[in-house]
Amino acid sequence: MTGINRIDQFVKSLSCALRGLVHVIKNEKNFQNELVISFVVILAMIYFNVTRTETVALVLVIAGVLILELLNTVVERVVDILKPRIHPYARLIKDLMAAIVLISAIFAVIIGFIIFLPYIFALWRF
């Protein structure tokens, strides 16, 4: 494979990935909500000038929740193709995936509180 073909293949792959990302941003309400919350957290990170370590932790948590939401969407679509009438576990699989996203979001909130509460309390002292 020549260098041009590799670049062309990379551009095609990137195009597919971006098309999927645009789809989920436009059509998935939970992903939209999580993006808004992520944006608020990023603004808070800038406002409070959090440490580098805290920034890394928050970015990892944000990425984790968004990635799990994407995986949830993929699994839901696959299960929708199969339909619940094919297997009684279809609904359970969707519920379990939603539970995975919920647990990740709960822990993200806990980590956010651990990081941001000292900064918020510092504002109240003055």
Image (cartoon, rainbow, N blue to C red):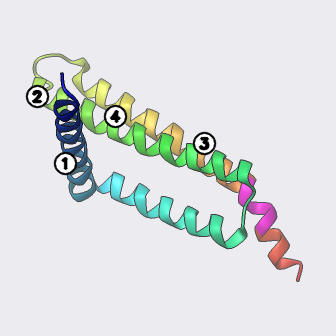
Q: Which residues are magenta?
A: 115-119
Q: Which mark is nearer the camera, 3 or 4? A: 4
Q: Which residue is mark 3?
A: 107
Q: Which residue is mark 1?
A: 19
Quadrant for the C terminus, please.
bottom right
**How many neighbours does mark 2 have within 10 angstroms: few (below 14), some (14-19), or many (20 or more)?**
few
Pointer 3 or 4: first along the chain: 4
In this view, the residue in front, 104 or 5, is 5
Q: At numbered mark 4, what does the secondary structure look like: helix, strand or loop?
A: helix
Label 1, label 2: how many angstroms apart (C-alpha)?
20 Å
3D distance between C-alphas at marks 3 and 2: 31 Å
Query: In the rendered view, does 81 fall on the left or right side of 2?
Result: left
The answer to which image quadrant residue 78 occupies is top left
Asked if labels 4 and 1 touch by Cβ distance under 8 angstroms, the answer is no
| Alpha carbons under labels 1 and 4: distance apart | 16 Å
Residue 71: assigned label: 4
Q: Which mark is residue 35?
A: none
The residue tagged 2 is 81
- Left or right? Give the position of 35 relative to 83: right
Where is residue 10 drawn, in percent x and y? Answer: 24, 36
- The picture places residue 115, in percent across and down from the top left corner, at 73, 55
Amino acid type at mark 4: Leu
